[in-house]
Image (cartoon, rainbow, N blue to C red):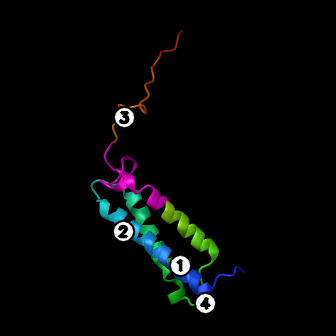
Amino acid sequence: MLPIDRPLLALFAMALCFGLAWACLCRLNAMSKDTTRPLIRASYAVLFTDAVAVASMPVWLPEIWAEVGVVCLVSGYLLVMVSNTRGWLHGPPAHARSTPMDLDGPLERTFETTEPQS
């Protein structure tokens, strides 16, 4: 066992989870059903629910405490959310939008159809 007090670890996990829930709420606020893919919206809603559930785990289930692995996992999620915040400043980025992307760039591939020679 690590020399970290379990209630202190639980409070740290709770703070990280509330930070993750806040980041999810900010992302959900930047989305709308007209501009964002439903799967993207659903994934942030589920992530928000999971963050709140993990944060309230010591309150509702006092025999279950946050472990170091939970803290590391939530820290990783929060780090990913913070690291790509810049792409969400003006609404959802292109990969999350439900509108068709412009394919005139490097992603466009053209295939020539050739008829079989007899």
Look at the image and say whether residue 74 sits in the magenta stretch. Answer: no
Q: CA distance from mark 4 to mark 2?
A: 29 Å
* Residue wearing tag 1: 12
Describe the element under mark 2 as helix, strand or loop.
Answer: helix
Instruction: Name which residue type carries label 3.
Output: Leu
Direction right: furthest residue? 1
Above or below 14: residue 98: above
Q: CA distance from mark 2 to mark 3?
A: 31 Å
* Residue wearing tag 4: 63
Instruction: Name which residue type carries label 2.
Output: Leu
User: Image check: 46 left or right of 97?
Assistant: right
Give x and y (percent) for residue 13. 53, 77
Instruction: Name which residue type carries label 1.
Output: Phe
User: Image check: 19 left or right of 9?
Assistant: left
Give the residues drawn in magenta, as a range. Answer: 80-100
Q: Along the polypeptide, which appears first: circle 1 or circle 2?
A: 1
Q: Which numbered disc covers residue 25?
A: 2
Q: CA distance from mark 4 to mark 1?
A: 17 Å
Q: Along the polypeptide, which appears first: circle 4 or circle 2?
A: 2
* Residue wearing tag 3: 103
Above or below 54: residue 108: above
**Residue at point 45% right, 61% down?**
81
